[in-house]
Amino acid sequence: MRILVVGSGGREHALVWKIAQSKLVSKIFSAPGNGGISEKAECVDIKTEDTFGLLEFAKKEKIDLTVVGPEAPLADGIVDIFNNYKLKIFGPNKKAAQLEASKVFAKQLMKKYNIPTADFEIFDNPGLAKKYIERKRAPLVVKADGLAQGKGVIVTKTIEEAIQAVESIMEKKIFGESGNRVIIEDYLEGEEASIIVITDSKEVLTFASSQDHKRIFDNEQGPNTGGMGAYSPVPMINAQLFKEILDRIIFRIIDGLAREGIDYRGALYAGIMLTSQGIKVLEFNVRFGDPETQVILPRLNSDLLEAMLATVEGKLAKFKRMDRWRWDERSCVCVVCASKGYPGKYEKGKEIFGLEEIKNIPDIVVFHAGTRKLISDVKGQKTIKYITDGGRVLGVTALGNTLKEAIYKTYQAAKVIQFEGMHYRRDIGWRALKRE
């Protein structure tokens, strides 16, 4: 099979890395890809938002399955367009992608179908939003309705901060049109977890639990990011709690979408808060998480591509009967190495050192996120080097017999890698270690 993976981040590198292990694959392309992806796939210079460029490429290259990594193309309707041309594509259609593209849509759906989430109100007028805040007690969470590259959620500790958040989102338009409406919701106290499944709208195939670390600095300090690291599995989520999450959240939202006339096929991500009052949904995403994918896929001992095909074709029930879904019992940890300045304005073009030294160490894999490969040929001597080309540059990932061992191996590998201005959190997995 000829596969096209759309995207250029660490999640897409992990997807390419796992899909490349399938016996069904003959060739993988990635658009636009990155330096690390180029080792497993042929990178093509087509931007993720260039839907018709991707369509023409898929037709020309006779692509058997397109896998969409990021949320923006899904929200723009790439699946609908590919389906119109009878091209197989993994991901939800435009109507289903509203679950992430509009937080208002998601919250209203949760309320309608009795899915546990924080109490909330919706506003399209900043003045009314501010008056509502003044009647509330902090802390509060202010969310932009639309897509904001994972940065549209602002946790505020005081009433003044909440008002400033409304002004930033709705009046200063820091997230553009995504901030035309806001959700103001009660702050939830507890521990977060990510639950990812794939579904063909009838059956569900579950992935291992994981936990992301959003804040830029240790001890959950500083601004939110796209994710600074993750680990899997989450010790708090035992079999009973996992079943409760499926019954009360995953199955209800898929059934609710179906009742709304929406056929959901693809990956579904539920961000869960484990509170003293029980499980609550923080958000839904319509794709694999990043960096959660980087710690889940190394633990998967099954053919991901087979499962994706079954999802697209509506044959997950048959796939599940084959009983081929297997997991590595070990823990997995990913630490994100970021550029100087991230999550604000960051530097690019810094040479990365140390990748070759850890390339062949067992149970260690480095997923590239913001990198570019440079190849030079001087007098017949080919030289390859990698430079930074994004905020989150690398995801250093390791498997270990215990979480403690996986953490140790990950950080030992991270010490070998260097580039100017590199920084990373040094406490990934701290909650689970504290519990142990």
Image (cartoon, rainbow, N blue to C red):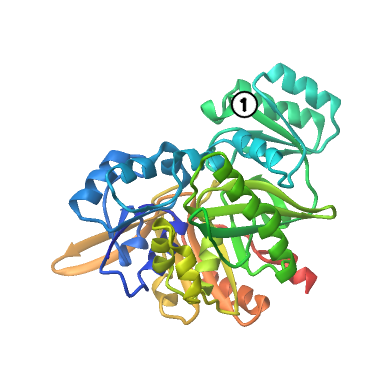
| Residue at the spot 31% in from the left edge and 62% down from the top edge | 38
Can the viewer see residue 336 in this picture? no
Specify the farthest residue to the left. Answer: 379
Between residue 366 and residue 79, name the one nearer to us: 79
Amino acid residing under circle 1: Arg
Give how far across and how far down residue 410 sits, in percent. Answer: 57, 72
Please name whichever residue, 350 or 120, is drawn nearer the observer in this view of the structure. 120
Occupied quadrant, residue 235 = bottom right
Expressed as whole percent of the image width and height from the top left, the position of residue 117 reads: 73, 45
Query: Residue 424 versus residue 32: which sits nearer the camera?
Result: 32
* 30 relative to 426 in the view: left or right: left
Q: Nearer the viewer, residue 273 or 341?
A: 273
Figure check: 1 above or below 54: below
| Residue at 48% from the left image edge and 38% from the top image edge | 95
The residue pinned by badge 1 equals 181
Q: To which quarter of the image does residue 174 belong?
A: top right
Please indicate, yes or no, whether residue 134 appears anywhere in the rendered image: yes
